[in-house]
Amino acid sequence: MNYETQLLGDSAIIMDGDDRRRSRKKLIIGAGVVVALIAVAAAISMRGGDPAATPAPGAVAPVVTVTSPGQSTVARTVRATGSLAARVDMPVGVVGEGGMVSRVLVQPGDWVKAGQTLATIERSVQSEQVRSLAAQVEVARADAKLAQAQLDRAKALVGRGFISAADIDQRTATRDQAEARVRVAQAQLAEQRARTGRLDIRAPAAGLVLTRSVEPGQIVQAGSGVLFRMAKGGEMEMQAQVAEGDLATLRPGNSAVITPIGSDVQLTGRVWQVSPVVDPQTRQGIARIAIPYSKAVRPGGFASATITSGSGSAPLLPESAVQSDPKGSFVYIVNGKNQVERRNVTVGQVSDEGVAITSGITGAEKIVTSAGAFLTPGQKVKPELAKGR
């Protein structure tokens, strides 16, 4: 019993020494953790409280390319959409009394000259009337010739006393009436020929045939409506729907670039009329843009337009400098402490020269031109001015 008690007492003494060593080790580790946390907290407070801006021990601030664009002259533009149409749309219908269409001589897409026949109407009856009136003209001329001969013979006999002066006057009047009947017959013949000629449906001016709504055998008359539609001279236009605020900036003569929907063709045109009224429902007005003929321009189609309404000054940045997120467009600038700052901007005209910024910056700032997606606000960087700036 004494032996076992001695063993147990020795074991207790050994175990008590191990516990003391483990407790001392835990105290040292805990003290080290506390010191580290205090150091991190001090570093964060010196950096302004932003953990993301705290560089790792020994880290080097990244080099970023910046630019100070200043102010550049940029075009002020207005974007709009609208429909395409003929600048001068000419409806062509029946001018005369009408009848049965015998021939249609043109198709949509054909170019025609002024006065060219588009369709003809059957005219057998009118042709006979013309021949009848022509014969009456010949009869009247014969009567006039006879009356003139009788007057000449009477004048030859008046000196011999066989014909009185009263007879001469009578024969002169008869001759004048005969000549007048000739003129009446000629006028009636010309009228009938004109009526017959109006049976031809002709182009009122040179231009492009847009539509055709008549076929041979069809009966047409003055109330038949439009048989053909033409674009005078082939000239086209875009009727651009422009917001009320933008409409006030447009003037006749402003240049525009038109792109028909479904085509990559870009046409250059000019505003020739700005609507004097605004639709009270849509708050929009119409700017009519004259454009040259192109196969890509089909009246009734849709197109988009970029109208240059003037010029102004604005910072011009490369596209890589402008970023966007759900909050809008923004750029990163480097402040006096070489820290990154976010600056919200409004984007204006985008062209081959760059992106015009209409508000948000003045152009004197140091703006990050690339690698902005890898930066965070407050981050320390080393700015490097872009070449040529």
Image (spheres, grey):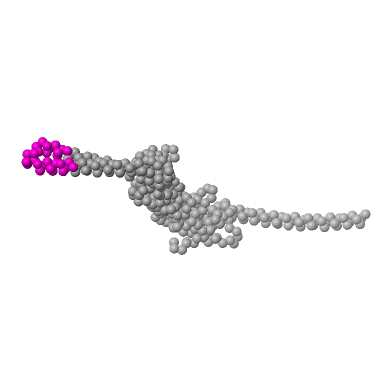
Residue 229, percent across and down?
40, 45
Q: Which residue ends up furthest to the left in the rendered image? A: 160
The residue drawn where x is 41% and y is 39% is 279
Q: Is residue 41 magenta?
A: no
Q: Which residues are magenta?
A: 146-174
Q: Is residue 5 left or right of residue 112?
A: right
Tell which of 338 and 277 is nearer to you: 277
Q: Name the quadrant containing residue 16.
A: bottom right
Q: Quadrant of residue 171?
A: top left
| Residue 32 shows in the view | yes
Count of residue discs: 0
Determine if residue 182 is in view.
no
Q: Who's the residue at 6% across and 39% down the image?
A: 161
Q: Nearer the viewer, residue 140 or 364?
A: 140
Is residue 173 a member of the stretch shown in magenta? yes
Residue, far top: 166
State the predominant SS element of the stretch in magenta. Answer: helix
Q: Toward the viewer: 203 or 218?
A: 218
Residue under the point 52% across and 48% down: 327
Position in image of residue 266 (x %, y %): 43, 54
The answer to which of 33 and 64 lies nearer the viewer is 64
